[in-house]
Image (cartoon, helix red, strand yellow):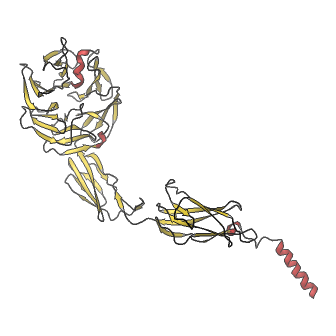
Amino acid sequence: MRRLLAGAIAASLVAGCGSDSTAPSSKSRLRIDAGADVTDTIGAVLTQALVVQVREPSGALVRDAVVRFTALPNDSMPYASAIEVAPLTSQYFSGFTSDSTDANGRAAVLVELGGIAGKSGIAITVPELGLTDTAWYTVKPGQPSRFALGVSDTVVTRGVAWDIGARVMDRAGNPLSSDSVSYTSLSSGATVTEAGHVTAVSEGRAEIEVRYGTAHDTSRASIVPPGLLVAVRPGNGLYLMNLDGTALKQLTGLNDYSVFPQWSPDGKRITIYEGNPYGTVSFTAVSLDGTRTPVVPSPISLLGGLAWARPDPSGLLYFAGPRTDNGAMTIWRMSADGSGLVALRSPANSYDFTHPAPSPDGKTVVYDLDPQGIMALDVASGTVHALGLQGFFPVFSPDGAQIAYITGSALMIANSDGSNARVLSGSAGYDAITAPSWSADGKWIVAPWPGRGAALVRVSDGVTLPLPFALGYDQFALH
């Protein structure tokens, strides 16, 4: 009986030695003991360290093994800090650190959650034993800290609708619910729904107040009338766009920086000037499909002042150019095809270019002359008198009743006889190459706004509508 029992015990021991069923798996050989599967908010330094234990294949504890802890990148923001680690004795967190196992086979690090809400992980490796595992964490957004507007300023026409798109965020920029954001229209030019959906109702400057708790901001819109705007990107091209900045297209490429585009009275073409005003220049009509047609068959030096050529309703062009005898500036007139060239008047023995503009009836030409100011030339008699206005680029309104002009700091307007001069907008100003441009109905003026592109100014009350899309362009002409 004793022999049978001894044989059974021996057989059992042999069977146990020939099987791996009791040996630790690679997973159990690198075991996370504490500090993982934690949920907390952004920026939290976890009180419980991440602790792992390392064992030999036999199950024996491993001492002095190097354990590497590497923060995994976040897929949505790979260059941002999703989670960081630090040695137990340090206060400085980074994307990597290591520790050596102690007598109990354990290694540990401190964990700080990063600024990206979502799932974050720390890769744990023991290179000398080929062991790996990952500790995962759930990072929750922080408390509401700020909000941003998807649309802070825009340009639209009546009837257009858009969403302000307010976004509530925590201090790290993680999105939060925007259900508590409120919207209030501060003007009659636009309506807004509880969800921030805005509709443009009438021309003018619309403002929508946006609030979240005690924080607030304002979303603005320039609501403009229909119209076409031509502008120059210096050294690049002549561009056509709607007055709200949409449907932008290049009409023609340009090498020059100052071409001073002007609409023809019928709105079918734009004249441009190219060349050296003190040498040889060319004068070209560009159609709305980009076709170029020379207005004057061959470039000639007499047309130096065509840079500022302006048509009257009949199509006659008025410009300043040098006299043939002494080179002093003279005001000239010619037909749109370059024929019928007539010298109207030499404003003075001045060699500076001036900017003549005809009245709608073609009877008067106004121009700027330094230092006398803005002058008026009677075409029939040739007499000249000062209007008592100081400024540049005078332009008649479509009905001839008013003159708009630019000073060093403002867009000005006056009666055509020089009376009742006043500031129309203090936002517009002088930029040396851009004249004010009237709308066909005389209700609006586009003027340069140095540093901000252009502004559309309402003549009746001076309401100024910024056109931020015009930044980078100049020499505006409205139709």
Quadrant position of the C terminus in the picture: top left
Identify which residue, 324 or 395, lies in the foreground: 324
Identify which residue, 249 or 305, lies in the foreground: 305
Residue at the image point whose x is 21% and y is 41% from the top: 456
Q: How many numbered discs, if any?
A: 0
Whether residue 159 sits left or right of residue 67 in the image: it is: left
Identify which residue, 122 or 176, lies in the foreground: 122
Whether residue 419 sits left or right of residue 429 in the image: it is: left
Q: Position of residue 188 (x, y in %)?
A: 19, 54
Q: Quadrant of residue 109?
A: bottom right
Q: Position of residue 96 (x, y in %)?
A: 57, 59
Residue at the image point whose x is 21% and y is 32% from the top: 435
Q: Position of residue 115 (x, y in %)?
A: 46, 61
Whether residue 2 sits left or right of residue 267 in the image: it is: right
Res. 70 in view:
no
Res. 14 in view:
yes
Quadrant position of the N terminus in the picture: bottom right
Q: Quadrant of residue 216?
A: bottom left
In the image, farthest residue toward the top: 325
Q: Position of residue 25 (x, y in %)?
A: 71, 68
Task: Examine the rendered structure and indicate whether residue 284 appears above or below residue 170.
Answer: above
In the image, farthest residue toward the bottom: 1
Residue at the image point whose x is 26% and y is 36% from the top: 228
Identify which residue, 460 or 435, lies in the foreground: 435
Q: Quadrant of residue 421?
A: top left
Task: Examine the rendered structure and indicate whether residue 253 appears above or below residue 449.
Answer: above
